Image (tube, rainbow, N blue to C red):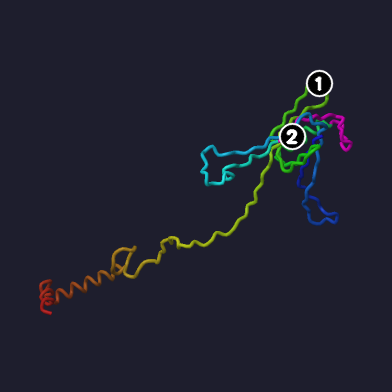
Amino acid sequence: MLTITWATESTTRSPDGGDAVSGLDFQVLYLDGIISEGRNKGVDMSVHPIERAQDVTDHIHPKLQVITAECIVSDTPVNALVNEEDHVQAVEEQLDDIIDAGIPVDVEDDRKYWEQYIIIDMVIARDANTGDASQINLTFQQLKLADVEFVDAPAPSVERARGRQDNGRRQGQEGGEGTGSTDPSERQSTLRAARDAIQERGGISGVLGSLGGS
């Protein structure tokens, strides 16, 4: 007999009407008999040459184990705990739900118990010899889980490039270019004062002469 066990989340509310409590419901499915069973386990090995100084095991990776089982399910199950009018249909529907939802299952036969497998293939066959019973061929593949942990990144040892800082416009500059007053009226006043000074000294030649004599 093949036994498949899985867990589903459930939510219940306390009798006093308090908060809902989440939990797990464990369910069991029995398949009457096993016609044949197989197990496939191997490794992937690098096809490239490996240096003699290196550890060979670093280039070998175990494959996920695969279990196959050909089972018989009938309306007169061997397990006395099962009491269903149409046991075959109930088993097929339950297996459909497990496969569609991708639920991890545990598998047990008369010799061993395997934890955390996914049903990746199911074939149901009926013929004149099976009658009302069904032959269900299942393929289970091992599920490998990994834990993920988020940590803070360490501070860089070398200061990274900083973004350009806008310090605003400098005094006497407009738009970051050129010098002088930003007020047009002030610029005109400065030019007028320079012109008046030139005229008082007799024009440009007078100004140059005064500069040369100083």
- Residue 3 in view here: no
Quarter assignment of residue 173:
bottom left
Question: Which secondary structure type mostly characterizes the magenta part of the structure?
Answer: loop
Residue occupied by mark 1:
129
Q: Residue at x 54, y 61 (%)?
A: 154
Residue 1 in the image: x percent, y percent?
Answer: 82, 34
Q: Residue at x 65, y 48 (%)?
A: 146
Q: Quick one: 143 or 182, which is closer to the camera?
A: 143
Picture layout, residue 102 above or below residue 12 = above
Q: Amino acid at mark 2?
A: Asp
Report if residue 152 lies within the magenta region: no
Residue closest to the far bottom: 214
* Residue lying at 65% horizontally and 37% vertically, measured from the top left: 42
Q: Is residue 84 left or right of residue 138?
A: right
Q: Quick one: which residue is furthest to the front in this view?
A: 52
Give the spatial CA distance, label 1 vs label 2: 24 Å
What count of labels does the image hold?
A: 2
**Residue 7 occupies quadrant:** top right
- Residue 97: where, in percent of width, then height? 74, 37
Do callouts 1 and 2 mark residues in contact (Cβ within 8 Å)?
Answer: no
Q: Residues within 10 Å of mark 1 (few under 14, many from 20)?
A: few
Q: Position of residue 151 (x, y in %)?
A: 59, 58
Bounds of the magenta span?
A: 67-86
Residue 160 relative to residue 47: left or right: left
Circle 2 sits on which residue? 96
Farthest residue, direction right:
80
Amino acid under disc 1: Asn
Note whether residue 81 is visible: yes
Left or right of residue 125, residue 179 in this image: left
Q: Residue at x 81, y 52 (%)?
A: 13
Regarding mark 1 in the picture, which secondary structure is present there?
loop
